[in-house]
Amino acid sequence: MAAEMAEQPDALARLLARAPADAQRVAQVLPRPFAGTVFLARGSSDNAAVFGRYLAELCSGRPAGLAAPSLYTRYDADVDWHGYLLIALSQSGATPEVVTTCTAVRSAGAAVIGITNEPDSPLSGVVDLLLGTDAGAERAIPATKTVTGQFALLATVAGALGTRAGRAGGSGAIGAALAGLPGAVAAALADPGPARDLARRWQDIDRLVVAGRGLGYAAALETALKVAETTGILAIGMSTADLYHGPIAAVYGGARVLLVDGTGPADADLDELRRLLTSRAAETATLPVQAGLAEAAQAITAVVRGQQLAFQLASLRGTDPDAPAHLTKVTATT
């Protein structure tokens, strides 16, 4: 896991270098007229999909949402998909329900883009365009470099949607937003101290809330998943807004909450939550990210900080971050 985390700056730089060509390929498969975007994924890929959902709707001016695969694998839903773009994310490209759902919605009229790290996987045969994260073999069960690759590719796709719609948030704006990303990730990886110090404070906890909003919400979800799967800690990622709607009752004195700053318009909500939790004697923390980043790059770098925290917690608690108990690299949900 540590070695694969260290490969992320180079992997991200490669994706950003080919982003203009990828954006052109995306534009060629977009449905016309274009109704909206739906994201299909599970696990870490689903957290990347949340990031993509925000960017796609912002950039395209069309609705974006998340698919429910069981509608097609269990309920045999009959849906008209004409005008829609489906973006399917699977690091392995082999999750059966993702492949089955792509087949169903493509036959119902959708244009389908697949994002995977395995170009020869089953996913490649059921999409109109395949975009590879090209991160190299990922051997640790917890996904790291393939996840940040998915985040970066989704920014490229969203930019292409904006360009096609003639909106200001097109590919040029997205490219500028991610320009400093490889360097920011490299800087975070070179400075493991904040994550190591926080892990030492929290190594004995049995539950953790990770909260963010906007693009930072996706980073919060992914951080919580990494902590849970590497350590066995019951970690839950939430939107700051959702936390207020009931779950805040369980965040009492002594509870630990990791807040993911996004440097975007939702940060005011995070500041308000921090004040409330402090007044309730909950323990909050934030892992630092390089100053001056655009919101999309900030969120992706925060994902890397979350990986560091998960790795450090696992090391201190004596669990194997490369092969957590009861998990496999490919989860064969149908």
Image (cartoon, grey):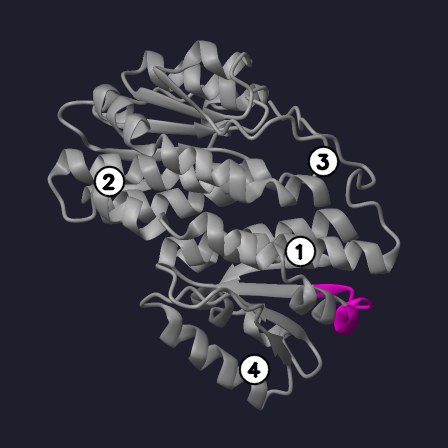
Contact? badges 1 and 4 (CB < 8 Å): no
Labels in figure, total: 4
Question: Counting other residues with Cα less than 10 Å from the Cα at mark 3, is it few (<14), some (14-19), or many (20 or more)?
Answer: some
Contact? badges 3 and 1 (CB < 8 Å): no
Q: What element carries label 3?
A: loop
The residue that mark 1 highlights is 308
Tell me, for residue 277, which label it has, or none: 4
Amino acid residing under circle 1? Gln
Gap between marks 1 and 4 measured at Cα: 24 Å
The reply to whether the magenta stretch includes residue 204 is yes
**Horizontal relation, residue 257 to residue 290: left or right:** right
Whether residue 46 is visible, yes or no, is: no
Q: Residue furthest left?
A: 166
The residue that mark 3 highlights is 141
Of labels 3 and 4, earlier in sequence is 3
Report the span colored magenta. Answer: 200-207
* Residue at the image point whose x is 66% and y is 24% from the top: 332
* Residue at the image point whose x is 54% and y is 22% from the top: 97
Of labels 2 and 4, earlier in sequence is 2
Gap between marks 2 and 4 measured at Cα: 39 Å
Of labels 1 and 4, earlier in sequence is 4
Tell me, for residue 123, which label it has, or none: none
Decide: is 199 above or below 189: below
Contact? badges 2 and 4 (CB < 8 Å): no
Question: Counting other residues with Cα less than 10 Å from the Cα at mark 2, is it few (<14), some (14-19), or many (20 or more)?
Answer: many
The residue that mark 2 highlights is 171
Q: What element carries label 1?
A: helix
**Horizontal relation, residue 270 to residue 78: left or right:** right
Q: Residue furthest right?
A: 318
Amino acid residing under circle 4? Leu
Of labels 3 and 2, earlier in sequence is 3
